[in-house]
Image (cartoon, grey):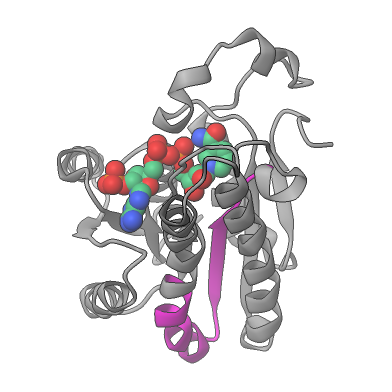
């Protein structure tokens, strides 16, 4: 489905990003996997994709750093010849009520989760314009749609991702570039470790279970493929019905 395509995926070392890297690779894409702190995990991902006969390079980059992103995108374009699919998945949480939330608690989450996506889009923008083709997939959250107590920083960033998605979709539509957002609910990863299988959480989800990273990866593969060519500027929830 994705033969001949190159996918640049941020936060590919763990969780949802790792599952997306494996899925897109299985579908035939070459993978440029960005990690930040988890070099060993990134190497494990590379070993797995190498073993399966896929193509992958791993790159260390802090997505909140504008010039680091610029350098890495240049390197990826030089290594692979271009980027067809950009998945802005890297993200962090730092949950506190506004009462306890300091300036740095707010800024660090905005810088990674929102500015990080802007940085990668900004530096891939000319590549997409020249190619007259592209699929940009931004990972938002249901917190960005309905809000969540304790997540003023995170839900602001994830709501910002939705605005960014729709704006980029409008700017690049004439160049045949689609830009969509995925808004997951509770997905089993390191990020949600502290409340997995918590009865209050499970009872709030109509499907009565958390989602898996592989289920999010299936949706990302659809949005990365030509099956979704007439979808742009859309936000797709994958949340077991949580935010309906
Ligand atoms: P995770 O398991 O904690 O993984 C986070 C990933 O982001 C890691 O690969 C990490 O890389 C990377 N990352 C963090 N800061 C970075 C930075 N400054 N620069 C580059 N990479 C950075 O989280 P996850 O659950 O898979 O979440 C992935 C995305 O889905 C996030 O955007 C998250 O907000 C969103 N999401 C998750 C859920 C959920 O329930 N899990 C729900 C809604 C939305 P290193 O380890 O290499 O530093």
Does residue 106 appear anywhere in the picture?
yes
Where is residue 194? Give x, y as percent. 46, 20
Q: Quadrant of residue 163?
A: bottom right
Give left or right: position of 108 versus 56: right
The residue at 74%/68% (across/down) is: 230
User: What percent of the width, then of the height, locates residue 240?
Assistant: 72, 28
The image shows residue 77 at horizontal and vertical percentages of 29, 78
- Residue 45, compared with residue 82, is above or below; it is above
Q: Position of residue 156 (x, y in %)?
A: 63, 55
> What residue do we see at 56% from left, 59% from top?
138
Is 82 drawn above or below residue 6 in the view shown?
below
Residue 216 makes an appearance in the image: no
Quadrant location of residue 127? bottom left
Q: Which residues are magenta?
A: 120-142
Q: Is residue 10 above or below residue 167?
A: above
Q: Is residue 202 left or right of residue 21?
A: right
Rendered-image quarter of ligand 1: top left
Residue drawn where x is 15% and y is 39% of the image: 40
């Amino acid at each position: 489905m994705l033969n001949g395509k190159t996918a640049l995926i941020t936060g590919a070392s763990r969780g949802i990003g790792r599952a997306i890297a494996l899925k897109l690779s299985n579908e035939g894409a070459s993978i440029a996997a960005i990690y930040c702190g988890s070099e060993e995990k990134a190497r494990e991902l590379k070993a797995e994709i190498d073993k399966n006969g896929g193509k992958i390079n791993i790159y260390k980059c802090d997505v909140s750093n504008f010039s680091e992103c610029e350098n890495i995108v240049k390197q990826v374009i030089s290594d692979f010849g271009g980027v067809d699919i950009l998945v802005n998945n890297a993200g962090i949480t730092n949950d506190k009520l506004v009462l306890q939330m300091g300036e740095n608690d707010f800024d660090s989450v905005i810088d990674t989760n929102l500015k990080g996506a802007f940085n990668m889009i900004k530096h891939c923008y000319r590549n997409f314009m020249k190619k007259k083709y592209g699929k940009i997939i931004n990972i938002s959250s249901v917190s960005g749609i309905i809000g969540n107590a304790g997540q003023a920083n995170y839900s602001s960033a994830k709501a910002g991702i939705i605005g960014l998605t729709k704006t980029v979709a409008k700017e690049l539509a004439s160049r045949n570039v689609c830009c969509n957002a995925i808004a997951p609910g509770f997905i089993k990863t390191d990020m949600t470790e502290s409340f997995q299988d918590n009865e209050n959480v499970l009872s709030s989800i109509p499907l009565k279970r958390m989602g898996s990273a592989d289920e999010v990866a299936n949706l990302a593969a659809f949005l990365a493929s030509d099956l979704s060519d007439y979808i742009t500027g859309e936000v797709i929830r994958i949340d077991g019905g949580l935010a309906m």
